[in-house]
Image (cartoon, rainbow, N blue to C red):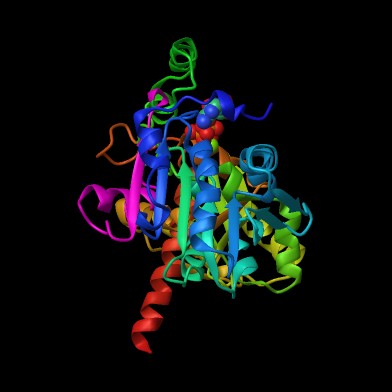
Amino acid sequence: MPIKWENSKYSRKAKAFLSKDPMEFPLLTLLDGAIRSGKTSNIIQKIPQIFEAIGNNNLKVFSGYSKTSVRNNVLIELIPYIEDYLGGKVKYSTTSGEMEISLWGKTYPCLVVGGGKSDSAAKIQGGTWDFWYANELPQHNYEFYNMALSRLTPEYARAFADSNPESSNHWLYQEKIKPYFEGLNKDIFEYWHFSMQDNANLSETFIKNQSKLYNGVFKARKVDGLWVSPEGLVYDTFSCQKHVINHDCIIEKICKNEIIEFFLGIDWGWNHPTACLLLGKDRNDIFFVIDEFYAFKADVSNIISWIDTKQKEYMRFFSFANCDNSRPETNNALRQNSNLIIYEEKPRVEDSIAMVRSLINYDKLIVSEKCVNTLREFEIYRYPTLDDAPVKLNDDCMDALRYALFSYLSKRKRLMQLQ
Ligand SMILES: Nc1ncnc2c1ncn2[C@@H]1O[C@H](COP(=O)(O)OP(=O)(O)OP(=O)(O)O)[C@@H](O)[C@H]1O
Ligand SMILES: [Mg+2]
């Protein structure tokens, strides 16, 4: 049921946002806070006035995690608002994402795009925009976000975004919101925080019931609208929606020679499982966890034959393995019985976790859905308290991952220093 705008009630904050002159906003304005707090509908109501102020010389872009999410969250309200309340006309093609909004004597060319995938930025290269609405900005791919900002070249260009809070480790919090609180970048970024009380259209009972639905970190984020990290989770920005890929897509990338280097990380175990992860890196420096070996009481011969089978299966040679250094004799057996270079470099836990976290934050680490044990550990690998080392539980794939990436990235750093 579309919103009945004639019955709208406005809180003080909504009024302040809606009555601000569009040109008084800086380049990027973020509305964040609790669910149902009116972030999206405030932007929707403001759009006609913003369009009028900006004019129709350039393209206007609407993005979200996917085109479908923009349609479900935004267009579903925006189109009836423009057509039924303001007497305008909207033409929208779901396939191309092209949209034309005719309102108050002007026609505005618009485009709806999905920005959540690691290859989304490629879709928006080139062209000048003078308006961008990012619905659920934290769900956007980091490169897409930067590319989108760089498209907004006209001086009068404006971007608006809405967002539910995520982890305080998220790039949006670290790069925009936190500096804003510290008094930085206020000339290019404005921040509006909404609580459910700032949506005068919600009933007291609805607000009370919502608070009862959530606990802990979810309550803090969804009801209180705070950017907090889930207690103790090591990789708290890893998202199944964004960072997991269908295995067939990986095979396709390998067949098309998009993944160009293959290497392994191994964490030896016996009573704990042995985990061996096969990683690949593509031409855009995105790392893929392609496959995993995970078994209790596995010995080196099992690993040797697994590596051999996988080299044949993917029809690629793997260049190196970085292995847990607590088993020199096992590592030596692997060295003598495989065609791989075997490293035994144990990285410092904090350094290598920080490295993996930063890859995740910038959407540079993608895991095949085939790697079920790795995915399970991403969801449960945690710290006992926030400042400690992680609990040595559910960490087998996580250790193998750190070894592989650390070795790859530190080797590359060394090579760069030599050049
Ligand atoms: N101006 C308004 N007039 C009437 N109802 C409104 C108005 N603004 C918001 N609402 C009501 O409040 C609901 C929540 O608003 P909205 O979807 O904008 O919140 P949100 O902060 O974007 O929520 P979410 O985080 O869930 O996306 C709407 O579905 C609508 O029912
Ligand atoms: Mg919304």
- Residue 411 percent location from the top left of the image: 41, 74
Q: Is residue 140 visible?
A: no
Q: Residue furthest bottom?
A: 419
- Residue 185 percent location from the top left of the image: 27, 59
Q: Nearer the viewer, residue 84 or 236?
A: 84
Examine the image and state in which quarter residue 389 appears: top left
Q: Which residues are magenta?
A: 169-197
Quadrant in which the C terminus appears: bottom left
Q: Residue furthest top?
A: 205
- Residue 396 percent location from the top left of the image: 48, 44
| Residue 59 in the figure: left or right of residue 225 | right
Q: Residue 360, relative to residue 254: is it above or below?
A: above
Examine the image and state in which quarter residue 55 appears: bottom right
Q: Is residue 251 visible?
A: yes
Quadrant in which the N terminus appears: top right
| Residue 149 in the figure: left or right of residue 247 | left
| Residue 353 in the figure: left or right of residue 214 | left
Q: Residue at x 34, y 83 (%)?
A: 417
Q: Residue at x 70, y 59 (%)?
A: 250
Q: Residue 263, relative to residue 352: is it above or below?
A: below
